[in-house]
Image: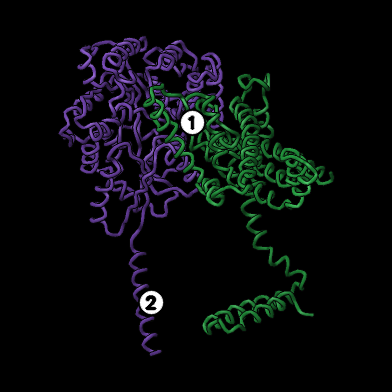
């Protein structure tokens, strides 16, 4: 029996025996193989062939442990500490004080009655944003994918155009739109030149909320359109031909073929867009700073502000808020998984 | 061929080694700095002279913006032990315990004590500190209003003099704006620090005699209502307070572009105006408006400090000694048009042929004796940011209609209490 490593070596050797490779490259390759063999052979003798799988995933596990698991545990610990010192050993244990502070409320539907009213404002804003943004994003992406799936002129060009904003940095997107929408911005200049009055795009709460949603849909729809387009193209054309022969119209075919067969892809889009919407921060922060007032302050910005931007640097309160947010996300994810299983069974 | 190749390799390695040794001899220090006007350029020029005289030290100045770089990132960097060697700061309270004690390192500690007001040296010290020297105040500022005098002349309206209230300034600025077709009459930077002076003039008192803090006073409400009135009547650019999110936001661009009649800011704008307004119009600083609490602005300014995590304390002390020396600080002050905290600079020859800037400097110097006790307590009592930032943010919520003034006062008191509890 040969080991996993030896099997791969044989495959690579076969590849490198081709004539098109020059001698220097071959030498480098040989040197690398020798070095790897020097390390891997004794290692394989030590841990066995099955153990090698763990050796190969170890680097990734280390990165996951250091940059994800450890900060998560640290966050959990911080949620039960107080003060403004950064290092854990300097922070006093305060038990459930931070969570109590977040949940001290006379009426949860009225943020003004809550001790930490900004947390509840951010929570309300986030729920509204997620609901509206995800619904609009999925709808616009679906319509765009359906159009781009048709045999229209310059289809490749339009696919590129819709995907282009996805390549832009969120901060760049925010600054471009801010330049357009600010009080003395391009759009108001056009409105005034046409004889109209300036509109308070970024200083009215309703307008600001509207534009935050529109811009995030504009910036992200290309990505989801691409996924839905792939889903649409995987539906066999014969199904539509058969439906047509049976006398089904376009709407009927859409309802009976497209929607059911696209549902797994739609679920992926829904899950991804929902998670991204809950995490909304960088683009909105650069665009409105969370304002006017707190109209576009979402949960991640609240956590950032409390922990890092406020002079008090309440890391404990910020960590407690992120625990609450994590719990909500866990519930949402569980719900989506359940939904996914149900739709698969159906 | 092989031996020649080896020779080249040897020469290259020796050259690299020489460079590395040379590089190791030069100590690199970093300063985190922000600029309102030309002070970054002036500092760089002075440091170039220092480096020429001290070839073993190289000083890198990292210019950052105030809101993010100084207010948000620097405290975290310093707390994590990843901060610069030195920095220009305003919120000196949050770094207490993190400064480098320069007393045993500087050439003459007595010079520092004689040159800088004891209260400014003490402002950097923790409660259990005694005589440590952590840095110096390199700029004194006073808040106060500016007016666009050209617009008053065009409107044919006299600039009010004597004891003028905020209500009267609001009215006259409005008249000037209407007469001249200027978009905005009056504006104030989005800052709790800027709001505090006018509030104290209206009779607000933050600090009680027993040491407690009460935000809800008739004077505070009065000034808040005036600010709200500016917004509801549309005479102030709403972008400044309402459209700025959660950060400091200056209204200076509106004033510089001639779109504003009266602008409440402070002495640090003088260099900015001298540079950017030029001779486009005549501007001047006017005394802080008066009220039941007198006529007061807010003191302020920036400190230049050294941090304890530096790996080169001796070299840092040499740079600090240099920048705090009479000649250097005098040159810095004269070129930046700042008000100095140093007590022994003598007569200053501000390097500007701009008569408006010189007059504004004199105006702000005259404001210093009028500053109220409450104003000094707020600025140097270590609570400035714990109070000013919530004031700014809660007032913004009133301006956007999210909160009534009554609701805002309750939340504001809670915010301040919470922040005091975490200190």
- Which label was assigned to residue B172? none
- Can residue B199 be seen? no
Q: Which quadrant of the structure image shows residue B57?
A: bottom left
Q: Chain of mark 1?
A: B
Dot in front, 1 or 2: 1
> Is B2 above or below relative to A218?
below
Tell me, by letter, which chain the rendering colours purple: B
Left or right, B10 with reference to B337: right
Q: Look at the image and name its color scheme.
A: by chain
Total numbered circles: 2
Measured as percent of width and height from the top left, residue A213 is found at 57, 34
> Is B364 above or below relative to B10?
above
Query: Secondary structure beneath disc 1?
Result: loop
Query: Secondary structure beneath disc 2?
Result: helix
Measured as percent of width and height from the top left, residue A335 is found at 76, 39
Q: Say which residue label 1 marks.
A: B246
Q: Which quadrant of the structure image shows residue A206?
A: top right
Q: Which quadrant of the structure image shows residue A266?
A: top right
Identify the residue shown where x is 35% and y is 18%: B372
> Is B188 above or below relative to B42?
above
Q: Colour of chain A?
A: green
Q: Chain of mark 2?
A: B
> Is A21 above or below relative to B53?
below
Identify the residue shown where x is 34% and y is 64%: B25
Mark 1: few/some/many CA within 10 Å (<14, 14-19, 20+): many
- Seen from the viewer's position, the closer of residues B142 and B318 is B142
Image quarter hosting the C terminus of chain A: top right
């Amino acid at each position: 029996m040969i080991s996993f490593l030896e099997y791969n070596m044989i495959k690579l050797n076969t590849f490198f025996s081709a004539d098109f490779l020059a001698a220097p490259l071959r030498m480098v390759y040989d040197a690398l193989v020798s070095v790897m063999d020097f390390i891997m052979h004794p290692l394989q003798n030590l841990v066995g062939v099955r153990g090698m799988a763990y050796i190969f995933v170890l680097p990734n596990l280390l990165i996951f442990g250091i940059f994800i698991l450890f900060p998560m545990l640290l966050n959990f610990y911080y949620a039960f500490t107080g003060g403004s010192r950064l290092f854990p050993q300097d922070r006093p244990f305060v038990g459930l004080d931070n969570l109590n502070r977040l949940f001290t409320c006379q009426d949860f539907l009225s943020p003004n009655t809550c001790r930490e009213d900004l947390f509840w404002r951010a929570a309300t804003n986030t729920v509204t944003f997620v609901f509206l943004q995800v619904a609009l994003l999925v709808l616009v992406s679906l319509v765009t994918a359906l159009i781009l799936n048709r045999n229209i002129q310059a289809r490749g060009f339009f696919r590129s155009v819709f995907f282009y904003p996805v390549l832009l940095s969120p901060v760049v997107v925010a600054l471009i739109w801010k330049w357009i929408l600010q009080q003395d911005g391009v759009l108001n200049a056009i409105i005034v030149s046409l004889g109209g009055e300036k509109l308070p795009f970024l200083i009215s709460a309703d307008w600001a909320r509207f534009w935050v949603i529109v811009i995030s849909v504009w910036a992200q729809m290309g990505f989801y359109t691409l996924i839905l387009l792939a889903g649409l193209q995987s539906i066999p054309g014969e199904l539509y031909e058969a439906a047509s022969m049976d006398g089904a119209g376009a709407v009927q075919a859409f309802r009976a073929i497209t929607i059911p067969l696209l549902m797994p892809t739609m679920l992926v889009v829904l899950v991804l867009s929902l998670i991204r919407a809950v995490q909304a921060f960088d683009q909105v922060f650069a665009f409105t700073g969370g304002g006017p007032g707190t109209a576009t302050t979402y949960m991640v910005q609240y956590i950032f502000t409390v922990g890092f931007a406020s002079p008090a640097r309440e890391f404990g309160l910020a960590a407690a808020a992120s625990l609450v947010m994590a719990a909500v996300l866990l519930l949402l994810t569980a719900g989506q998984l359940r939904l996914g299983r149900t739709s698969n069974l159906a | 061929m092989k031996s020649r190749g080896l020779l080249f390799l040897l020469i290259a390695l020796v050259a690299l080694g020489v460079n590395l040794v040379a590089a190791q001899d030069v100590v690199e220090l970093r300063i985190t700095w922000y600029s309102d006007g030309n002070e970054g350029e002036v500092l760089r020029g002075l440091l170039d002279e220092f480096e020429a005289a001290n070839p073993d030290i190289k000083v890198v100045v990292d210019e950052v913006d105030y809101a993010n770089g100084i207010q948000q990132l620097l405290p975290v960097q310093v707390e994590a032990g990843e901060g610069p060697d030195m920095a220009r700061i305003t919120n000196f309270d949050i770094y207490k315990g993190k400064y480098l004690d320069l007393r045993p390192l500087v050439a003459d500690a007595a010079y520092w004590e004689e040159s800088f007001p004891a209260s400014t040296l003490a402002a950097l010290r923790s409660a259990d500190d005694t005589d440590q020297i952590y840095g110096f105040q390199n700029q004194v500022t006073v808040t106060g209003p500016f007016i666009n005098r050209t617009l008053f002349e065009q409107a044919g309206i006299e600039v009010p003099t004597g004891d003028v209230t905020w209500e009267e300034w609001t009215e006259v600025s409005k008249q000037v704006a209407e007469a001249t077709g200027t978009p905005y009459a009056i504006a104030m930077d989005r800052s709790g620090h800027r709001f505090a002076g006018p509030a104290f003039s209206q009779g607000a008192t933050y600090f009680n005699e027993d040491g407690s803090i009460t935000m809800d006073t008739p004077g505070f409400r009065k000034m808040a209502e005036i600010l709200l009135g500016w917004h509801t009547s549309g005479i102030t650019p709403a972008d400044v307070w309402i459209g700025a999110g959660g950060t400091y936001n200056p209204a200076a661009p509106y004033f510089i572009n001639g779109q504003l009649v009266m602008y409440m800011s402070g002495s640090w704008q003088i260099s900015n105006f001298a540079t950017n307004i030029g001779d486009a119009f005549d501007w001047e600083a006017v005394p802080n408006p008066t009220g039941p609490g007198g006529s007061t602005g807010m003191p302020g300014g920036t400190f230049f400090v050294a941090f304890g995590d530096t790996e080169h304390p001796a070299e840092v002390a040499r740079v600090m000694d240099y920048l705090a020396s009479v000649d250097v600080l005098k040159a810095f002050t004269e070129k930046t048009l700042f008000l100095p905290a140093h007590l022994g600079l003598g007569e200053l020859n501000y390097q500007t042929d701009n008569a408006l800037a010189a007059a504004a400097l004199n105006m702000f110097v005259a404001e210093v004796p009028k500053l109220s006790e409450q104003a000094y307590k707020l600025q140097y009592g270590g609570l400035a940011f714990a109070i000013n930032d919530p004031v700014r943010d809660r007032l913004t919520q009133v301006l956007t209609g999210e909160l009534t003034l009554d609701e805002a006062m309750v939340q504001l008191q809670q915010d301040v209490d919470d922040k005091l509890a975490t200190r």
